[in-house]
Amino acid sequence: CQTAVCGDGFVLSGVEDCDDGNDDDTDACVTGCVAAGCGDGFVQAGVEDCDDANMSDTDACVDGCVAAACGDGFLQEG
């Protein structure tokens, strides 16, 4: 018997969202056994263009973790 910990590959109900047992922060489960999502600071491969973990729509990564581009409806700084 061992104490359950984040990273052991088993989800501890009520404590962890997920536990994939790896250190890859580009998949569906990021550091701290938290389910990946826009705004967590990690770019989820195949799902997000970017993830700068802020709420600013005037930088290179706008709402919805999409790379800023002409026509996106946001005025970019500079």
Image: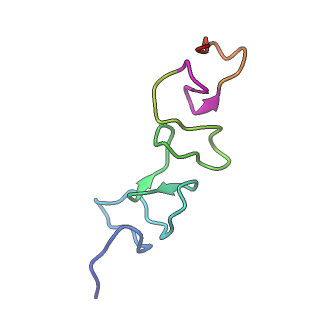
User: Residue 32 location, x and y as percent?
Assistant: 38, 58
Q: In the visual, does 46 lie left or right of 58?
A: right
Q: Which color scheme does this rendered protein use?
A: rainbow
Task: In this rendered view, identify the residue nearer to me: 27 or 18.
Answer: 27
**Residue 63 on the magenta span:** yes
x 50%, y 64%: residue: 23
By secondary structure, the bulk of the magenta-drawn segment is best described as: loop
x 39%, y 56%: residue: 17
Task: In this rendered view, identify the residue nearer to me: 72 or 17.
Answer: 72
Q: Residue furthest right?
A: 70
User: Residue 43 location, x and y as percent?
Assistant: 58, 45
Q: Would you place residue 21 above or below residue 50 in this image?
A: below
x 65%, y 38%: residue: 49
Where is residue 51, by image quadrant?
top right
Q: Would you place residue 68 above or below residue 51 in this image?
A: above
Q: In the visual, does 24 lie left or right of 5?
A: right
User: Residue 72 location, x and y as percent?
Assistant: 67, 17
User: Which range of residues does the magenta coloring cover?
Assistant: 57-67
**Residue 60 on the magenta span:** yes
Q: Quadrant of the N terminus?
A: bottom left
Q: Would you place residue 62 above or below residue 34 in this image?
A: above
